[in-house]
Image: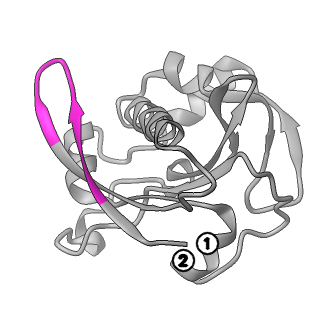
């Protein structure tokens, strides 16, 4: 595995923002195109969470999901249930996606790399070669986490999988 910090330019209709994404994925496992698609999917999903865009959030979820912290699988919840839960993701509703990008790291890794990055393994995970784990709840060094943390971090750690010719959120 090769550790790599890359700078990507994220284009939005109104602004151009440089953001840092730490990517720890094997070059032999994913093509550049696959990595780019996974990163774009991840950014759209994170934007949907921060901006409380239920349509994008809900359409990103797989029909069959599993819990990252338990050995449990379940069907995609109703849209109403998922969207009601999404309301909790951001504690401070004045925060924007721009704030999120400035304050938190976005780490995309292979699930088996979790222990080396986060200090603990992913419990009850059955390995799938099409999976990537996203950790987007860890603050950047300059962010005053103790005073300003505004994330409900459960929404900002998830597993994505390439399934039926598209990326989806598979583990939450």
Disc 2 marks which residue? 118
Q: In terms of secondary structure, where does tag 2 sit?
A: helix
Please state the horizontal and vertical placement of residue 53, each as a whole percent of the image: 43, 22
Q: Quadrant of the N terminus?
A: bottom right
Q: Is residue 48 visible?
A: yes
In the rendering, at what x and y percent does residue 85 appear? Answer: 59, 35
- Per the image, the residue denoted by label 1 is 114
x then y, percent, for residue 74? 87, 38
Say whether residue 10 is magenta.
yes
Q: Residue at x 42, y 34 (%)?
A: 40
User: Secondary structure under badge 1?
Assistant: helix
Q: Magenta stretch: residue 81 in it?
A: no
Q: Is residue 77 above or below residue 143?
A: above
6 vs 68, left or right, is left
Magenta stretch in the rendered image? 6-17
**Label 1 CA crowd tier, 10 Å (few <14, some 14–19, many 20+):** some
How far apart are the alpha carbons under marks 2 and 1? Answer: 6 Å
């Amino acid at each position: 595995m090769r550790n790599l910090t890359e700078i990507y330019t994220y284009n939005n209709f109104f602004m151009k923002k440089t953001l840092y994404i730490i990517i720890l994925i094997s070059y032999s496992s994913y093509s550049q195109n696959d990595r780019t698609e996974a990163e774009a999917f991840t950014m759209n999903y994170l934007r949907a969470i921060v901006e409380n865009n239920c349509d994008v959030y809900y359409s990103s979820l797989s029909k069959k999901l599993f819990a990252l912290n338990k050995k449990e699988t379940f069907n995609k919840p109703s849209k109403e249930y998922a969207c009601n839960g999404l309301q909790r993701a951001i504690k401070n509703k004045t925060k924007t996606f721009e704030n999120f990008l400035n304050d938190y790291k976005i780490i995309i890794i292979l699930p088996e790399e979790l222990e080396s990055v986060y200090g603990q393994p992913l419990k009850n995970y059955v390995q799938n070669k099409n999976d990537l784990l996203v950790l987007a709840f860890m603050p950047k060094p300059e962010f005053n986490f103790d005073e300003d943390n505004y994330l409900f971090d459960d929404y900002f750690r998830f597993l994505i999988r390439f399934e039926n010719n598209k990326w989806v959120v598979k583990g939450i």
